[in-house]
């Protein structure tokens, strides 16, 4: 699973410099500031800092700028603009496409020194700096204040890309997407004169930079500027008690991991499993569904992995939680004849943070620094057809391709509270989906690139053959997830749907995103292969 101003706020003063122990911004004490550092190609650190999670994409910038304050980001951007240098920004490094690391980028601005998580009493919101990793965000918010964000599973994903693309996880059906709790953002932008500055944009429609907040709430990373700080507060909350200003995770959860051996699945039973899954999430996608306290993942790995897995989390404090889980697993496996297999793998009751850590630790690919990968995504309003499930089965049982990391992952992170928000309230437009799907494969040897990429393209193209190879928005499908960017989506050889890639990601919200792009990045400083285009 992968992944990515308040009214009248004054510009931040220059505060960078060696020896400064901290600085004030928006009424909060932030993490210690150290001097910005440039890492050049002859530095031993350069190799580590010019490649992200996906080892396919390696950059060759003139230097990497390590920053630890907003002012240092402003200076780094200004320097790049003044020198005519193409720049990119890295938060957690999990961009699955070559948006950050590629041969056209001259300067990479690395936000790993901006990792603070704190409470800002003036804004009555939690401040999370743009380089914070999800694991640190969860740990700090919960241990200090008993609250959390409903974000993803991978601990090393950066909040910057994750939040700007929307952000989903096991708590999203219950509490919404990450950006549904976004109060404000601080973004370094560049105006028409070429001047870099920090802008704070807030959720309040009266905020003069509200449009920039809107675009940052689901418009994707690397489009408008560099987010140096997010402020999070759940809508409708107020007061001085931090513990009441953001959602509280369940005290305990039921965590179920059920492995079904491939030997128990022929094509008919596999198809039944996929269609059962879609039917359940379609039936429980409403914001008011009592089943929104349950969320699950079905990892349908290649047959060479020997098993497919159903990973499920339920709020153990919800009424009838155990019955809900039992009914869910029964509905998904109905007609498969694997009741005994399911019964032999009972759920564990765990404290919520224990479950977060266990899930992260149980998926080695989350932290494996040697992997190359490719992925594609799809939002579903209704379940897959039998023909689509059969296409999955053929790809996952191929004998000429035997990579256990090749998989179709059905992710029940949409629906429920996510769908309670109108599609035009934030840039995250996919508010009518029941679930989404990640089609992916990972490998280590560069010599295996063609085989893996070819397998994935054939799998995805076969599943979506009726709509030109991509999930064109219709009564069944709802486009693609910007946080799982797909380099093929812009290529008419693969995307024969007739639907532009911008529509697959943003649907009717794209024209507004373009207008905001023109207002805040008129020189197109912040751009990549699939960035928002100037109108």
Image (tube, helix red, strand yellow):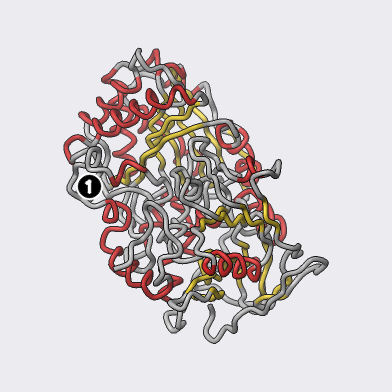
Q: Tell me: 423 left or right of 180.
A: left
Can see residue 170?
no
Q: Quadrant of residue 111?
A: bottom right
User: Is residue 302 shown above or below 377?
Assistant: above
Residue shown at 56%/53% (left/top)? 90
Q: Is residue 379 above or below residue 521?
A: above
- Residue at (59% x, 57% y) in the render: 109
The residue at which mark 1 appears reads as 472
Q: Is residue 506 above or below residue 52?
A: below
Q: Nearer the viewer, residue 513 or 103?
A: 103
Residue 162 image offset from top left, x and y in percent = 50, 53
Assess disc 1: are there few (<14), some (14-19) or many (≥20) residues with their C-alpha within 10 Å of its C-alpha.
many
| Residue 528, x across and y down, in percent | 41, 54
Q: In the depicted view, which residue is nearer to us: 523 or 279?
A: 523
Foreground pick, 191 / 177: 191
Q: Residue at x 22, y 38 (%)?
A: 493
* Figure check: 521 above or below 360: below
Is 291 in front, or is 236? 236
Percent coordinates x, y for residue 93 in the rendering: 56, 47
Question: Position of 79 compared to 287: left or right?
Answer: right
Determine whether, in the image, residue 482 is placed left or right of residue 19. left
């Amino acid at each position: 699973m992968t992944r990515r101003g308040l009214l009248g706020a004054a510009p931040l003063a220059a505060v960078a410099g060696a020896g400064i122990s901290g600085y004030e911004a928006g009424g909060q004490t932030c993490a210690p500031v150290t001097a910005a550092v440039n890492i050049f190609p002859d530095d031993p650190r350069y190799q580590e800092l010019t490649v992200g999670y996906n080892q396919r994409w390696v950059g060759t910038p003139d230097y990497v700028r390590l920053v630890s304050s907003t002012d240092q980001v402003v200076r780094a951007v200004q320097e790049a603009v003044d020198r005519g240098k193409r720049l990119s920004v890295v938060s957690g490094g999990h961009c699955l496409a070559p948006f950050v690391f590629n041969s056209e980028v001259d300067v990479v601005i690395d936000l790993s020194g901006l990792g603070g998580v704190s409470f800002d009493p003036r804004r009555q919101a939690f401040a999370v700096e743009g380089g914070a990793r999800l694991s640190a965000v969860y740990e700090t918010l919960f241990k200090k204040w008993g609250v959390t964000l409903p974000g993803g599973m991978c601990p090393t994903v950066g909040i910057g890309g994750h939040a700007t693309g929307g952000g989903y996880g096991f708590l999203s059906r219950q509490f919404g997407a990450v950006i549904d709790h976004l109060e404000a953002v601080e973004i370094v932008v560049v105006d028409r004169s070429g001047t870099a500055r920090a802008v704070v944009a807030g959720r309040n429609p009266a905020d003069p930079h509200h449009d920039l907040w809107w675009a940052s709430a689901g418009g994707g990373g690397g489009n408008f500027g560099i987010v140096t700080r997010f402020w999070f507060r759940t809508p409708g909350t107020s007061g001085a008690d931090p513990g009441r200003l953001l959602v509280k995770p369940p005290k305990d959860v039921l965590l179920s991991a059920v492995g079904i051996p491939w030997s128990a699945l022929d094509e008919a039973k596999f198809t039944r499993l996929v269609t059962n899954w879609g039917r359940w999430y379609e039936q429980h996608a409403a914001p008011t569904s009592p089943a929104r306290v349950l969320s699950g993942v079905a990892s349908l790995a290649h047959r060479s992995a020997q098993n497919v897995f159903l990973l499920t989390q339920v709020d153990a404090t919800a009424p009838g939680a155990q019955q809900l889980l039992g009914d869910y697993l029964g509905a998904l496996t109905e007609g498969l004849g694997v009741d005994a297999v399911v019964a032999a793998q009972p759920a564990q009751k765990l404290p919520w943070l224990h479950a977060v850590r266990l899930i992260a630790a149980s998926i080695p690919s989350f932290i494996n620094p040697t992997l190359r990968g490719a992925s594609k995504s799809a939002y579903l309003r209704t379940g897959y057809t039998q023909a689509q499930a059969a296409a999955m089965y053929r790809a996952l049982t191929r004998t000429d391709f035997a990579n256990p990391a090749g998989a179709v992952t059905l992710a029940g992170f949409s629906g429920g509270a996510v769908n309670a928000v109108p599609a035009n309230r934030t840039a995250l437009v996919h508010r009518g989906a029941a679930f989404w799907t990640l089609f992916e494969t990972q490998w280590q040897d560069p010599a295996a690139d063609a085989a893996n990429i070819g397998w994935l393209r054939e799998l995805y193209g076969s599943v979506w053959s009726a709509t030109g190879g991509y999930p064109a928005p219709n009564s069944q499908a709802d486009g693609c997830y910007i946080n799982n960017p797909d380099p093929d989506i812009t290529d008419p050889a693969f995307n024969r749907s007739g639907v532009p890639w911008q529509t697959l990601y943003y649907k009717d919200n794209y024209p507004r995103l373009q207008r905001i792009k023109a207002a805040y990045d008129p020189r197109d400083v912040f751009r990549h292969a699939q960035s928002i285009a100037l109108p």
